[in-house]
Image (spheres, grey):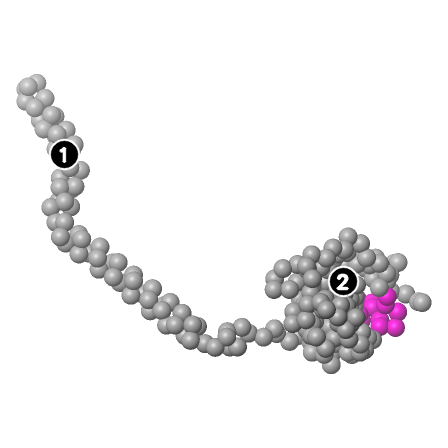
Amino acid sequence: MAATSNSLLSLTLSQSLNKPRTRRLSLSQSPTSLSLSLQSIRRSNSITCSSLNGPNDTNNQDLPIEKKYPAFPTVMDINQIREILPHRFPFLLVDRVIEYNPGVSAVAIKNVTINDNFFPGHFPERPIMPGVLMVEALAQVGGLVMLQPEVGGSRENFFFAGIDKVRFRKPVIAGDTLVMRMTLVKLQKRFGIAKMEGKAYVGGEVVCEGEFLMATGSE
């Protein structure tokens, strides 16, 4: 009986150990069907990718360059800007607002053209937008953020009070689009002082940045 039980035990163990081997052998016995299934999966994936990406890429390549780049959105046009800011030609340096959150932040653009009145003198042989005018343009965007009734600002008593940590990274020339973001950092209503951070970009690269102080109060 002991010999019989031992033989049954060894047979059971050998069968359990051999089960994974039997499964592997069954997979290896049909390499043709396995390779065919893998090929069909790859083919279906390539068809799906080509159907999703192929026509779009082709259409995009066929588009003329003037249709590839969308225009900036218009949240506030020049007429609405003139209703808020007191500046006028030749000192209004904001053409369009493309993002606006009153009392918090704003993003605006200034289209720099060779017809801007500062280029004949800065400089005749190499037209470059003066850095101080980039700072002024940023301050005007800050005015758009703060000159709102809910914030407490008024065009009659809002002033550019100071700048700090201003850096000019790259020159801005005719043909560039200056994209400016101004964000309110701190507002002290008691003293009528607003601290703001500003950055100006051309082509996604920072060309000017700094910290700004705005003051509300009597002259």
Which residues are drawn in magenta?
145-159
Name the kind of residue labelled 2 in the image.
Gly
| Amino acid beneath label 1 | Asn
User: Residue at horizontal 76%, vertical 55%?
Assistant: 166
**Relative depth, front residue between 199 and 5:** 199
Q: Secondary structure at mark 2?
A: helix
Q: Quadrant of the C terminus?
A: bottom right
Majority secondary structure in the magenta region: loop
Residue occupying the point 77% across, 78% down? 82
* 7 with respect to 17 (left or right): left
Locate residue 122, reporting x and y percent: 77, 68
Residue 163 higher or lower than 64, as above or below: above
Q: Which mark is residue 18?
A: 1
Residue where numbered disc 2 is placed: 131
Magenta residue check for 154: yes
With respect to residue 158, does 41 lie above or below? above
